[in-house]
Amino acid sequence: MPTPPAPGAEGLVLHLGMPKTATTAMQHALRAAAPALLERGFDYPPILGGKNASAHHDLPLGMLAGGEAAQAARQTLLRHVRRSPAPRILISSEGFTNLFRPGRLQALLRLVAKLAALRPVTLVLSLRRIDDFLLSMYLHQVKVGTVDRDVDAYLAGRDAWIERFFAAIAALREAGTARLETPVYRGAGFLDTLWPVLGLTAEEVALLPRDTRPNAQLGLKAQTLLMGLPVFAARAGVTVPSRLALVRFLEDNPTLFQGEIPRFDPMPPARRAAAAHGVHAYAEAFAADPPPAWPPARLDPGLITPDDLARLVDAGRAAGVLRPACATGPAA
């Protein structure tokens, strides 16, 4: 297994994700401390940020778009790498995993080769159990209101995605132009493992702000409520001024619903695909984990009882995250 570069070692780190491996907390902390880090020779540059200036999402977005957008994004990065006086540079976006597909992976490999001609390159891809990752992605999209399908419909076709994912990891490793590191995400405390892999010294980590709010996974009843929020709001005679505020309220009140089910797992691990492509770090990391329960519990509207709804309305109105339907103001 490759040895991670020593903290403080010169070079360029391209952090690829995966999503849902503390990436947002990591990027916000680095952006907040970027000026202080730059004084110590660690460059987390304010480029390619788009709407989210904490990360470098415009690079994979441009490469996905292709054509002039891809060329502009690549040139922005290459120009910065040539000009930066800092011995260490970090570029981060979980959007790079969207390039793990035919017609786009080769573009990523070519970019890595160009970067490697300028500086030593380390690719960092945090591994999370695939079943847990897909569940987390699904529930996150339920939270923010971008999916209204049952988990079975959401997971349709994911076997092909899993195969492409591990094939891409193998291609990145076998290209030979960059070191590939695959730290294993295990939830709380993972960033303490990740910082040195990204090249930060202990003194530099001490400069980073700490995110004290956990990214809690909501229980099954809370997720069911969010999946059918317009229907439940109409039934309860309330409006929702801010979906995000309601999500935060549910995260802060995990015992609001009686008989809450804490979590569910939708599919078995991806050990077979990982082994087929020689991604042994994945198989080794999760070999001792018990298989997830099958079949999973469902986001079933029948889970929300009248008592659950009454408790939600009372607590939600008191907290200001719900309003009577007759009140004015924007609704979710």
Image (tube, grey):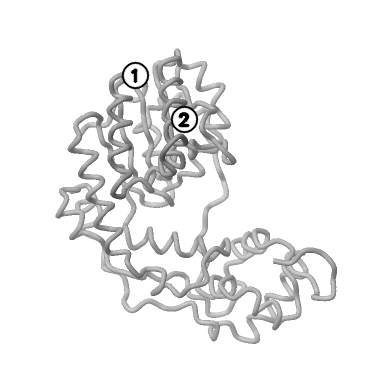
The residue type indicated by label 2 comes to Ala
Relative height, residue 76 to residue 195 (above, below): above
Relative height, residue 210 to residue 331 (above, below): above
Find out whether the residues at labels 1 and 2 contact each other: C-beta distance under 8 Å: no
- Residue occupying the point 68% across, 78% down: 311
- Quarter-of-image position of residue 118: top left
Callout 1 environment at 10 Å: few (<14), some (14 to 19), or many (20+)?
some
How far apart are labels 1 and 2 at the CA level? Answer: 26 Å
Front residue of 224/108: it is: 108
Tell which circle, 1 or 2, labels the residue nearer the N-terminal end.
1
Residue 155 position within the rendered picture, expressed as x and y whole percent measured from the top left: 37, 68
- Residue occupying the point 37% across, 76% down: 296
Mark 2: secondary structure: helix
Residue 210 position within the rendered picture, expressed as x and y whole percent measured from the top left: 54, 39
Residue 16 position within the rendered picture, expressed as x and y whole percent measured from the top left: 37, 40
The residue type indicated by label 1 comes to Glu
Left/right placement of residue 144 relative to residue 165 reads: right
- Quadrant where the N terminus is found in the figure: top left
Q: Name the residue under label 2.
A: 72
User: Looking at the rendered structure, which numbered label has been put on residue 10?
Assistant: 1
Residue 21 position within the rendered picture, expressed as x and y whole percent measured from the top left: 41, 48
Callout 2 environment at 10 Å: few (<14), some (14 to 19), or many (20+)?
some
Mark 1: secondary structure: loop
User: Looking at the rendered structure, which numbered label has been put on residue 132?
Assistant: none
- Quadrant where the C terminus is found in the figure: bottom right
Residue at the outermost front position: 67
Relative height, residue 316 to residue 117 (above, below): below
Relative height, residue 296 to residue 80 (above, below): below
